[in-house]
């Protein structure tokens, strides 16, 4: 899984998932979503996805016809932590957000480089400094925007 | 691509980076360039070398992208039997996936 984004579609709270089908086939992603009770309905973007999803979910699988509206608090767990200001790649942000989920007792640090860890320590030491929000900002741009 | 902070960090901390100007003549940079048979005023290239100058990955000549350098670095570390840190592997994997083409699907608990 490369990236995720929380949002709304047809008045329903949804998660958009971008994935590499060569490494994570849609059927495996759907099966994992079913196991974790996160895939009761699916909006698909390819004919193959729709065919696979219909076999599992019946008419709860439909082609995506409308663009979802992104949640104002996308990456909710990052937003509640100092990592909200840490420049990260999309995959790092997705992994770290998942590590911070309640009950997970995870360690987002495992996905970060030594320099990102140094910066994270600074973000934790100086929480009142007006750090710019880095969530969903491309890493080079977020890094360049950091206060000197 | 050399403005990408993670690539800069990888170059500085996992390799011994060495930048050689390719437009000089008769100086130390020119000697290195000639040693590696690189023409002057050519497009930039990146060699991934072991200490004995063995190539650890194909020379980067055309793919001037985060994908090109990140995947070259991962291959060089792997060939050189060095550990590839998770953060660099994640970057390379993401770039490879984006180049291959991502798919999107939308899920709901309802």
Image (cartoon, helix red, strand yellow):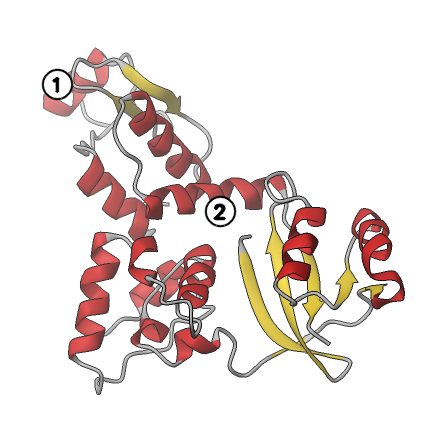
Give the vertical position of B23 relative to A87 (above or below).
above
**Dots 2, 1 in contact, CB < 8 A:** no
Q: Nearer the viewer, mark 2 or mark 1?
A: 2
Residues packed near mark 1 inside 10 Å, few (<14), some (14 to 19) or many (20 plus): few
The image quarter containing residue A80 is bottom left
> For the residues tagged 2 and 1, is the chain the same?
yes
Name the residue at the right extreme: A59
Give the vertical position of A97 relative to B99 (above or below).
below
| Distance (Cα) linking label 2 and label 1 | 42 Å
Which element carries disc 2, helix, strand or loop? helix
Q: Residue at x 20, y 33 (%)?
A: B15
The image quarter containing residue B108 is bottom right
| Mark toward the start of the polypeptide (2 vs 1) | 1
Which residue carries the number 2 mark?
A: B94
B78 to the left or right of A18: left
Image coordinates for residue B75, horizontal then vertical, percent: 37, 27
Which residue carries the number 1 mark?
A: B26
Image coordinates for residue B81, horizontal then vertical, percent: 27, 23
A51 to the left or right of A78: right
Say which chain tag 1 marks.
B
């Amino acid at each position: 899984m490369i990236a995720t984004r929380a949002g709304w579609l047809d008045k329903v709270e949804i998660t958009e998932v971008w994935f590499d089908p060569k490494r994570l086939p849609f059927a495996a992603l759907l099966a994992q979503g079913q196991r974790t009770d996160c895939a009761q309905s699916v909006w698909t973007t390819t004919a193959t996805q729709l065919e696979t999803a219909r076999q599992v979910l019946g008419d709860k699988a439909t082609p995506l016809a409308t663009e979802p509206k992104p949640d104002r608090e996308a990456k909710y767990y990052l937003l509640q932590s100092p990592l909200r200001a840490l420049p990260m790649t999309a995959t790092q942000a997705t992994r770290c957000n998942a590590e911070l989920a309640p009950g997970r007792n995870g360690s987002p640090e495992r996905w970060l480089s030594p320099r990102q860890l140094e910066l994270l320590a600074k973000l934790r030491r100086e929480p009142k400094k007006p750090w710019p929000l880095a969530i969903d900002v491309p890493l080079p741009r977020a890094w360049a925007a950091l206060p000197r | 691509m050399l403005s990408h902070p993670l690539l800069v960090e990888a170059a500085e901390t996992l390799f011994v980076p060495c930048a050689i100007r390719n437009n000089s003549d008769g100086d130390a940079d020119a000697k290195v360039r000639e040693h590696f048979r690189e023409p002057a005023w050519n497009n930039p290239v990146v060699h991934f070398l072991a200490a004995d100058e063995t190539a650890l990955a194909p020379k980067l000549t055309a793919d001037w992208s985060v994908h090109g350098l990140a995947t070259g670095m991962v291959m060089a570390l792997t060939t050189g039997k060095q550990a590839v840190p998770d953060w660099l592997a994640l970057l390379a994997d993401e770039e490879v996936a984006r180049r291959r083409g991502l798919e999107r699907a939308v899920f709901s608990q309802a």
